[in-house]
Amino acid sequence: MLKKRRLSQNEEAIRGILLIIVFIVGLVFLRDILVKRGVRILMLTRQDYMNAVEYYMQKKYGEKFEGEYIVDNSIYVHP
């Protein structure tokens, strides 16, 4: 019968590194989703708040929402 081949140390290391990379990418993706939903504890930057605002405005106004524009260093959201 077929014997299960034991992985070499290099293969185990590569598998471990890939697992870590997938885990980190998953965490970043999950954080982005939660920030868009408005979870405050994850909002670390001004851009996070703007992304959440844009998400809610697009949800509220749909395709009519055009985004933001800047006047005199102030951001105005335009539906």
Image (tube, grey):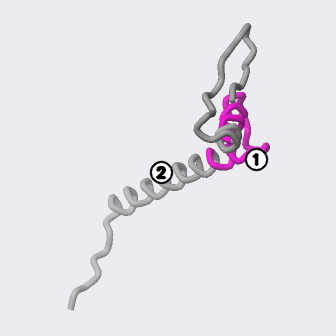
Of badges 2 and 1, the one in the foreground is 1
How far apart marks 2 and 1 lie (CA) works out to 24 Å
Q: Is residue 66 above or below residue 3?
A: above
Picture quadrant of residue 41: top right
Residue drawn where x is 74% and y is 45% of the image: 38
**Split into 4 quadrants, where in the image is the N terminus?**
bottom left
* Disc 2: which residue: 21
Q: Nearer the viewer, residue 13 or 60?
A: 60
**Residue 42 in picture, x, y percent from top left:** 73, 43
Residue span colored magenta: 32-55
Which amino acid lies under the numbered mark 1 shown in the image of this protein?
Answer: Val
Q: Residue furthest top?
A: 72
Residue drawn where x is 44% and y is 54% of the image: 17
Q: Residue furthest left?
A: 1
Q: Is residue 53 magenta?
A: yes
Residue drawn where x is 39% and y is 60% of the image: 15
Picture quadrant of residue 51: top right
Picture quadrant of residue 4: bottom left
